[in-house]
Amino acid sequence: MAETDIQRGLRLAWRQVATGLLLLVVSLAFAEPAPSPSVTVGSKTFTESVILGEALSLLLADAGIPVRQRAALGGTRILWGALLSGEIDVYPEYSGTLLREILADQRLNGVDALRAALAERGVAMSAPLGFENTYAVAVTAEISERLGLETISDLRAHPELRFGFSNEFLDRGDGWPGLQRRYRLPQTRVRGLDHDLAYRGIASGRIDATVVYTTDAEIERYGLKQLADDLAYFDDYQAVLLYRGDLAPRAPEAVRLLQRFEGAISEPVMAGLNGMVKLDGASEREAAARLLADRFGVEIAVQRTGLWRRLLARTLEHLGLVSVSLTAAILVAVPLGIVAARRPRLGQWLLGLTGVLQTVPSLALFVFLIPLLGIGWLPSVVALFIYSLLPIVRNTHAGLNDIPRPIRESADVIGLTPTARLRLVELPLAARSILAGIKTSAVLNVGTATLAALIGAGGYGQPILTGIRLDDTGLIMQGAIPAALLALAFQGLFELGEHWVVPRGLRLQPSAGL
């Protein structure tokens, strides 16, 4: 009778695996749309870039050109790599970033040399869009008045000041290292944080100085004083459009529409659009529609997507990422755990390898996979799969090793082959430990998947990142709360699965004392 229970448990276990495979197929079906759009528009993860990306997308779509948008993908290197690999066709960039960061090793002089260097890489550049958005060091008006700060050079006399810069600026070729050398700044209390969070930091008094973009709406909102760049460190950062060289023969009408933006946007106009989003609560798409109406006479009606519709879309995206990566991890990690338990020496290597993979910072792993797999869904699933391995491998290994020796010997005495012993005795006995590892992986997977929005995979991370950028707690909660609920749902699902997989005798709880 005990053997019948074990066999029944195994049949249910295999049914669970089949269900997981079905989830895999379904998730693959909705994870990425099948048709390839004619033009893919990208943008960086700050408001101005997103507005420009939205404006490009709306104008192309209004002309009947199929377009796909990859908004708020990340920093400069992610967008540049995506353009070179063909993941995107066009995105807004700045001339100073091209000269001092992307092509810094070329030591280029002048626009003609810049265009030639870009052409060698299969990239074309538009004429300037009409506004400059350069860097500036800013402090509060109170600090400026109290310490007499007017120029960046004045900071040399105040080594006690606390600096907070965006993480990208800390490492850019035209960022903090060069700024510190040019001005011989003595400050050592320098921290990296998100660009939009830096404004909150300086407003709360936790940092004394930060770097701003000169078209940021927050400069006026927080009453910041921009210090003069008296040694002319920051280059001319004219806004331009970068697009793939093969876009012109492939979609000449699209290139003609992109060229309409050349010289069409002044600095006050761009600052006003940024303020419309950051201060007035409009969406980037609404600001983009305003730009098209005011500058080009193109009237486009923009309707806001309802909360529940957005939530459904983000849930499907997040479920696709988690279900595919977790199912793949289960199918790989359980066999690896079995091998690790049966081959102790090899097992130490397997546990060590999965442990090392687990120590790689999650955001770094997402970015490392971009050159190999591009941006979006696929690298995100692979990264989440890697992060899901360790708990399952380790718990499978531990569960099998913890089986008492007399039980194994009894299985040998009745003549079970090693495969039959594993299938009929060892796996059912280790099922609770294995499921505990799967539950741990599922919860970690749901949380880590929010980072996938940084490389264009969507999910609950999208409203979280947008909320951080716009200083909107409500948007952050629209991603954070559903992610927490989904993690609890997965945990509950596997708790229920334990009743199907673990034999009844192993689920009996000891009674209270007699």
Image (cartoon, grey):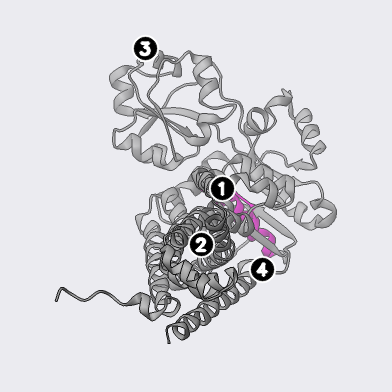
Alpha-carbon distance for marks 1 and 2? Answer: 40 Å
Q: What secondary structure do most residues of the magenta stretch adopt?
A: helix
Find numbered disc 3 in the image and state the secondary structure of the residue it sits on.
Answer: helix
Which of pointers 3 and 4 indicates the residue nearer the eye? 4
| Mark 1 or mark 2: whose residue is earlier in sequence | 1
Amino acid type, mark 1: Arg
Amino acid type, mark 3: Ala
Residue 50's place in the image compared with 446, above or below, is above
Q: Residue at x 69, y 60 (%)?
A: 60
Alpha-carbon distance for marks 3 and 1? Answer: 61 Å
Q: Which residue is at the front of the view, 107 or 411?
A: 411
Where's the C terminus, which quadrant?
A: bottom left
Residue on which disc 3 sits: 157
Expressed as whole percent of the image width and height from the top left, the position of residue 456 reads 58, 55
Residue on which disc 1 sits: 345
Q: Which residue is at the front of the view, 187 or 38?
A: 187
| Mark 2 or mark 4: whose residue is earlier in sequence | 4
Residue 325's place in the image compared with 147, above or below, is below
Expressed as whole percent of the image width and height from the top left, the position of residue 113 reads 78, 28
Magenta residues, start to end:
42-62
On the rendered structure, is 241 left or right of 72? Answer: right
